[in-house]
Image (cartoon, rainbow, N blue to C red):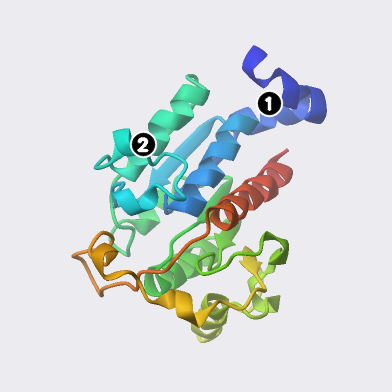
Amino acid sequence: MERFSRIIQVIGDDSFQRLQKSRITIFGLGAVGAWAAEMLARSGVGHFTLVDFDQIVKTNINRHVCAAESTIGIPKVEAVKARILDINPKAEVKALRLFADYTNRDQILDEKPDIVIDAIDSLGPKASLLEAIYNKGLRVISSMGAALKTDITTIRTGDLFKTTVCPLARNLRKYLRRRGIDHGILCVYSTELPDPEALKAPEEEAGDERYQRGRERNILGTYPPVTAVFGITIADLAVKMLK
């Protein structure tokens, strides 16, 4: 395929064919998840299941690969699906606009993807998803906290239970250890200490990304290169695991 000739030149045809046959499920199509999907599509992954409830809003424009004036109001799963198919029209993409929880999670995971990418940013849903993935014996790459970070040189990869600094990772470890899980979750994280002054959202923006379901989430500032590198690093890990 001409569109993938340059990556085939680097990794070889056999590895590329494995990518074409691979199935990736991505939970969370925010800045990190969308960038991971973008890089996986450009690397030749042939099958995607995309899971996200939200739609693109104006405050996504600084960091989301699909966010622009023309896509405001479009569900993130549909925007990312369109992006993938524009990159590779032969890709198979299932877009599920839903909030992943105990009522639908097992059905999604029962498709037995080759790799699951967890790019959810809420602690409770993220923790229960990781528990379900682990118990099903599926391979996973999980994104830790990318918000409030500005230094891409502090981004690391490793087992969740060996990470340092990241508060989200620390809370996930507590949850999972209580359920008998203490290893085996690959993640991308940052060792940068967040700036507490960045926690406060501008008042005029505070309504943009508060969701009606569940608890109100904090509005966290984001630096575009960091969220992009998180997503690209996840895609890099996935490609190397698959090829």
Identify the residue at horizontal 69%, vertical 69% (top origin). 159
Identify the residue at horizontal 26%, vertical 70% (top origin). 203
* Position of residue 79 measured from the top left corner of the image (x, y, whole percent): 36, 36
Q: Which mark is residue 61?
A: none
Identify the residue at horizontal 51%, vertical 33% (top origin). 47
SS for callout 2: helix
- Placement of 141 over or under 122, stated as above or below: above
Q: Is residue 101 left or right of residue 142?
A: left
Quarter containing the N terminus: top right
Q: Which mark is residue 17?
A: 1
Q: Is residue 113 visible?
A: no
Q: Which residue, as the protein is rendered here, is positioned at the far left?
A: 212
- Placement of 234 over or under 37, stated as above or below: below
Image quadrant where residue 102 sits: bottom left
Depth check, front residue: 12 or 164 = 164
SS for callout 1: helix
Depth check, front residue: 133 or 98 = 98
Single out the mark in the foreground, 2 or 1. 2
Residue where numbered disc 2 is placed: 79
- Placement of 209 over or under 48, stated as above or below: below
Amino acid type of disc 1? Answer: Gln
Depth check, front residue: 19 or 133 = 19
